[in-house]
Image: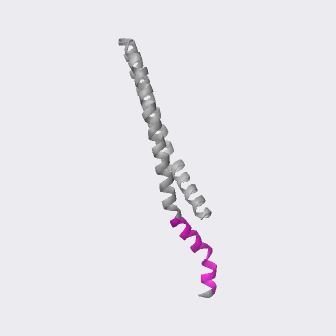
Amino acid sequence: TPVAQITNRFSADTDALDFALPNAISMWIDAFLTLLASVLLIAWQAPPMLAVFLVLSFVFRKIQSTFDASVTSLKRVDAASKSPIFSAFSQSIEGLSSIRAMG
């Protein structure tokens, strides 16, 4: 149901913001600074290697775009598989007053 899908989406977003995002930002900054220092040192010692880096960056970007499309599909399937669980939970909560009235 749409209510379960919305609940599922908000719970996943909250988890990402609370736990995964700060760690991901920290790792990204660390990796970026390491990469920048490496490229600068290599450019200083062997400038022709910059051409190799340029070609490799295009290859990497192509692989990354393929990976991103796959991840999007997998996330969609994961969300669809969780929705029935949230649907059952929300329906149980909505019917709780009826259960109490009859019980």
Residue at 53%, 54% in the rendered image? 12
Res 98 seen here: yes
The residue sitting at the bottom extreme is: 103
Residue at 58%, 60% in the rendered image? 5
Residue at 42%, 30% in the rendered image? 60
Residue 86 lies in the magenta-colored region? yes
Q: Split into 4 quadrants, where in the image is the N terminus?
A: bottom right
Among the 4 quarters of the image, the one containing residue 53? top left
Q: Split into 4 quadrants, where in the image is the C terminus?
A: bottom right
Q: Position of residue 32 (x, y in %)?
A: 45, 29
59 shown above or below 87: above
44 shown above or below 8: above
Q: Where is residue 76 in the image (x, y as percent from the top left)?
A: 51, 52
Display coloring: one colour
Q: Position of residue 98 (x, y in %)?
A: 63, 81
Q: Nearer the viewer, residue 89 or 61?
A: 61
Q: Nearer the viewer, residue 85 or 72?
A: 72
Res 30 seen here: no
Residue 76 lies in the magenta-colored region? no
Task: Magenta stretch: give its range.
Answer: 84-101
Residue at 46%, 31% in the rendered image? 61
- Specify the principal SS of the magenta part: helix
Q: In this view, does 86 lie to the left or right of 43?
A: right
Q: Where is residue 90 in the image (x, y as percent from the top left)?
A: 58, 69
Label total for image: 0
The residue sitting at the left extreme is: 45
